[in-house]
Structure formats: structure tokens, C-alpha cells
Amino acid sequence: MMTLLLTLALLWPLGVIGHAVWFTCRSPSKQRDYFSVLWLSAAWPALLLAYGGEAQWTIDAWMLGGEWALNSLSRPWLAFTALLWSLAAVHARGYFAAEQAQAQTGDQDAQRRLLRLSLLWPLTLLGNVLLIIAQDIASFYLGFALMTFAAYALVVHSGTQEAQLGARAYLVLAVVGEGLILGGFLWSAGEADTLTLQGIREGILNAEQGAWMAALLFIGFGVKAGVIGVHVWLPLAHPVAPAPASAVLSGVMIKAGLLGWISVLPLGHEGISVALAQFGNYMLVAGLVAAFAAALYGVFQRHPKAVLAYSSISQMGMMTALVAMGLVAPDVWPLLWPGIVLFAAHHALAKGSLFMGTSISEHLPRWPLPVIWTLLALPGISLAGAIGAGMVSKWGFKSPLYEMHHESLIKWLSWATIGTAALVSVALWRQWQQRQRGGSNRCQSGAWLVGILAALLTPLWLPLPEGSIAMPPIKEWVGLIWPFPAGVALATFGWLLLRPFDTKAPPAGDLWWLYAGLVGATLVPIRIFSQYCVKLKAASVASARKAEGDVMGHLTRLLSTEFWLRHHASGLMMVLAILLAALLMWEG
């Protein structure tokens, strides 16, 4: 049964793609449904697989030998991933309803965009599913790369200039990240002579240069996870991507980097070298810097999806710091990792709901406004740890840190949560400013409502190991809740303080523009040299043409001589004959 579910989980998205191609070729444009029920079901077998129980597969015929497994880590990860992909697909059916109607009238641009999205959406999902269950290097890298590059279509969908910029930033950083991941895999796998992720962890743990291997993989996966410095694609891509695409990009695809770290770094192992422990400290600092810097920069953004993108960077910074504890304090990792998985799952559904909510505020349903804005706020409140699963997930990692006496990190994370509350408050305010009436599609609002419910109740449906997560004691509730009102108050105070001033929002993408300027400055000598080469080429062509003209002139004159000889050949032969006869007579 499990093997059948695995086969369906991997082949069903390919079948969806094949059906989309066949249906597009066989049906007229007026009858094309790019988001049919079959298309919506692409992630359903993977969701069933997550709840089928633990299993392991060894497939010798697969590339270098496939090792796939569903265990205590991959099962919950696959569950929240497949659920969000399913909800985002239903949301997409409503979100693109108007564009599909436009395509059915014969608009070829709309047809091209929707066909590209309907084909590459299931392919991106397939890569995401494969990397979660993979335990060997080849399968993991194949899934990660497939997900990364197929997702380009999700960002560039609208085709506007801003979308092309966001997609270009995403693609440039993706290529850099893939190169670093491949380099880290080849180095560590060659050192350990292994083909599995378990072997990579042991190789990094035992290798003399293990810290450098870990650094390559940390930055490579960090591109997807939004590590500070390589995070710049997120605030550029999210504002231009469709809302359902942003939901899966920030909800589950960004978590692929986090899963990559957990899969390849020797977290929780005894005997970690001093260099690896020091690298863990650097990783911890990088995570905290991202948590605070993204919050500080993001509150000044005007586009609600840009604000939410910086919120994702900030939250992923907190998760980065927690993962780093597996290197800094290995003894805490066995207690900490279930809380990190719950944190990741809750963030995925809450952030997915917030991004889907941006499309709801752009097409407000005909409901009472207090009801709509309460629903829009619920995932953000939970994300800040004040209600529901957010409170439980915060306690899920704070409790082990308390038990192992890492109170200082708890304080830093609590202060970072204030930034989260401020960011979601600003995002809601920006949505209020940009709200539009018009009514949303039932699929659109229905998927959003289910996403909110799933975010609030994450611990109830996530298949985590029994007893790994507990409700926080009532005496701890104040310590978990206080960052939310503090963040709202801080955002309100900042708005009142800056309201009299006509402040210009800093550009989304922050360091991207610095990188672009530096690359542009570096390319100046190359441009000058290329211009010199162009001029040299033009001069060489001119000289060659002049030499060719001279040669052709000489040839023309020679041809004119030939023409004269051809017309006077008989006379010249007679003169030559007379001269020869005269010479013979003279000789005689």
C-alpha cells in the first residue's frame, strides 16, 4: 500500500502535466480549463502518503541507487507541504478565474501564461515532494533543482517589467545556490566516499575541513531559506508573483533550505569539532541578525506582500538560530527538533494564509468588514505566538531551551517576535489602504479559510512523534503572548511618529541594488574593453574591405586586358607567325 502511494505521489503530478498538454492540444480555447479538478489533485497522493505511516525504500535501478524514507522528520514535513500545495491550488482556481475567462475569449498571451503555469506548477510540486522523501544525494539534489528552476514560472507569470526583475533576481540567486550545494555535496561525498545524506553528515563531522563543507551547504541552502545576504530575491519576487504562488514560495519552498540543513549538517552529534562549533556560532549570529534586520527594514515597505516577504526572512532567521543550536549545544537537539518542525509547519500554513489573504483584500467578499479583517489578522496573531498553534509552536522550542539553560537565546527570540508582530500589523494596514471591493471567488476564499483553520490547529493534524509537543502551562502564557501587543504598539507608535513626514519607502530588495551596483562597477572595465574590441573590429573590417577593393581593382584591370587579348588574338597570332617566318628565313 505504501509503495502504491509513493508511486502515485511521484507519478500523479506527471500525469497531470500530460493531461494538461493533451487537453490543450485537443480542445478549442473556449473549452480549456487550465485548473481542472485533476490539476487541483496533484498534491493529494502526497498528502495521503504522509499519513500512511513510516516506510523505507531502496531502489537499486534509480540513478546511483535510490534511498527514500518516511520517518519522524519527513512525514510531518510532507504533510504540511502537500496540504499547503493543495490549498494554494484551489486558491489559484479562483485567483485566475478572470484570466482564464480572458484566455477563453482567444487572448493568446493569457493562454500562454496559464498554460506555462499549469504545466510547471505540478513539476515544482514534484521536486518538492521528492526532496522531502529522498535520503540519497542524487534524489535530493534532483528534487531540489527541479523545484528551484520550475518555480521560475511561478514568479514571472504576469510578464511585467517588475515580474521580470523579480524572476531574474530569483534565478541569479538560485544558480549561485545550486552551485554551492553541488560543490558542497561533491566535496563532502568524495571525502566520505558516500552516496547518502547520512554519509554526508558523518563525513562533515569527521572531515578535517568539515566546517568549510558545512559553510558551502549552509549558504547554498540558505539562498532558499532567506539567509541574510542571499535573501534579496524574496522581497523582489513576492510582490510580483501571484498570491497562490507566493503562498507556496514562502510557505513550503523556503522550508526546503531548512530541511537541507537538517538533512546534511551533523546536528546533535557528540564530538563536534571546535571548528564546527564555531561555525554554529556564526550561523546563530546570522540567524539573529536576519530576524532583527528584516523586521526593521520590512516595516517601512508599502506593498503588503513585500512586508510579508521580510516577515518570512525574519522568521526564517529565528529558525536558522534554532538549527544552529544543534552545532553549538548538541545535547539540546533531540529535544529541540520536534519544536522546529512544528514551528516550520505552523509558519508554512500561517504565512500561506497571509499571502492568500492579500488577494482577499484586493477582492473583498460581501461579508461584514470586521469579520473579514478579523480573519485576515488571525494567522498573523498566531504567527506572533499569541493564540492557537503559534503559542504551542513557540513553547515547543522554548521549553527545551529553558530545560537546557539557554535563557539568553530565548530572550533574543522573544524580542525578535516583537518584530514579527510589527510586520504583520504593518502588512494588514497596507492591505487596508489598498483594499478593493468586487467579490472574491468561492474557491479563492474557501482555500483561504481552510488555510487559516489549519494554521490555528497545526498540532492537531501534524503527524509528529507522540509526546514530542505539549501545551504550554498557563503560567507561561504571558511570556508567550506579550511580544504581540508590544509589536503592535511599536508599529502604531512608529506610524504616529512618522505620519507628519512624507517619508519615502526604501526599495524592496535592499542589498540587491548594492550587488547590482557593484557588479555594474566591476563590468565597467569589461564594457570599455568590449567597446575597444568593437572599434578594433570595425577598423579591421574597414581595412579588409579597402584591401579587398584594391585587389578587386587589380583583378578588374587584368580582366580588361584579357578582354582586349581575346578580341585581338587572331591578329596577334598572324603577327607572331610572320615574325617566326621571318626569323626562319633569316636563319636560312
Image (cartoon, grey):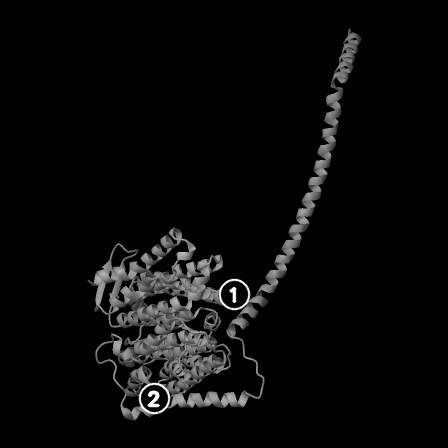
Report x, y in % for residue 494. 50, 88
In this view of the protein, can residue 48 be seen by the observer?
yes
Q: Is residue 139 left or right of residue 541?
A: left
Residue 508, percent from left and from top? 51, 75
* Residue 407: % across, % down: 34, 88
**Where does label 2 land, which residue?**
480
Binning the other alpha carbons within 10 Å of mark 2 as few (below 14), some (14 to 19) or many (20 upward) gives many
Quarter of the image with the C terminus is top right
Res. 160 mark? 1
The percent position of residue 227, horizontal first and vertical second, equals 42, 74
Q: Earlier in the sequence, mark 1 or mark 2?
A: 1
Name the amino acid type tagged 2. Leu
Residue 7 or 448: which is nearer the viewer? 448
Residue 446 numbered tag: none
128 above or below 277? Answer: above
Instruction: Please report the residue visible at 49 percent of the width from the left and 68 percent of the height from the top.
Output: 166
| Rendered residue at 75%/12% (across/down) | 577
